[in-house]
Amino acid sequence: MFIGEFKHSVDTKGRVAIPAKFRNQISSGAIITRGLDHCLFVFTEGDWEALAQKIIALPLAQSNSRAFARLMLAGASSAELDSQGRILVPDYLRKYAGIGKSVKVIGVYNRVEIWDESAWQKYKEKTESSGDEIAEKLGELGI
C-alpha cells in the first residue's frame, strides 16, 4: 500500500523522484495518467489493469462513461524508474496537472498521486476545513 506525503522537485527533463518507500512496488513498471482534481495518478501495472477492466466495462452509450474512459485511458503512459528512482512525467501530463518545479507525491493506498505543490496545499486546506461535513456525508454511506 502507498501512504504518506512527500515533497520533491521536478528536474529540467520533467522527471520526478518517487519516494524510496514506494519504489519497490513500482520497480517492475507503472502507469501514469490524468487523475481527478487535476492531479496525476500512478498505478502499479496490476492495479492499472484492474481499473482499466472496470472502465472498459462501463456502458458505451453513456457520454459520461466515454468521457471518463478517455480521461483515464487516452492519457495513460508507461513509467519506468530510472537508476535514481525517478519517473519521467510526460509534458502533456505536467500541463494537465499544472505542475511547476515543486510537487507533492502522496500515497493513497492503491495509487500514488502527483500534485503541483501549491495546488495540493489549496486542496488540502479546503478539504481540512470541511472535514466534519465530509465525515457526516460518509457516515450516511456507512463509513
Image: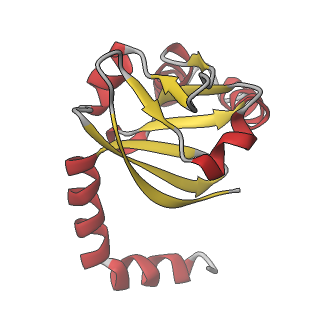
Quadrant where the C terminus lies?
Answer: bottom right
Residue lying at the far front in this picture: please name it: 84
Looking at the image, residue 74 lies above or below residue 101: above
Identify the residue at horizontal 20%, vertical 50% (top origin).
118
| Location of residue 81 in the rendering, given as x and y in whole percent from the top left corner | 62, 25
* 97 sits to left or right of 109: left
Name the image quarter holding residue 65.
Answer: top right
* 65 sits to left or right of 53: left
Q: How many marks?
A: 0
Name the image quarter holding residue 57.
Answer: top right
Identify the residue at horizontal 34%, vertical 14% (top origin).
91
| Location of residue 53 in the rendering, given as x and y in whole percent from the top left corner | 76, 28
Identify the residue at horizontal 58%, vertical 32% (top origin).
85
Looking at the image, residue 4 lies above or below residue 60: below
| Location of residue 48 in the rendering, given as x and y in whole percent from the top left corner | 70, 31
Query: Between 142 and 42, which is closer to the camera in this rendering?
Result: 42
The figure's colour scheme reads: secondary structure
Quadrant where the N terminus lies?
Answer: bottom right
Identify the residue at horizontal 43%, vertical 55% (top origin).
6
Query: Between 106 and 124, which is closer to the camera in this rendering?
Result: 106
Looking at the image, residue 111 lies above or below residue 55: below
| Location of residue 125 in the rendering, given as x and y in whole percent from the top left corner | 23, 68
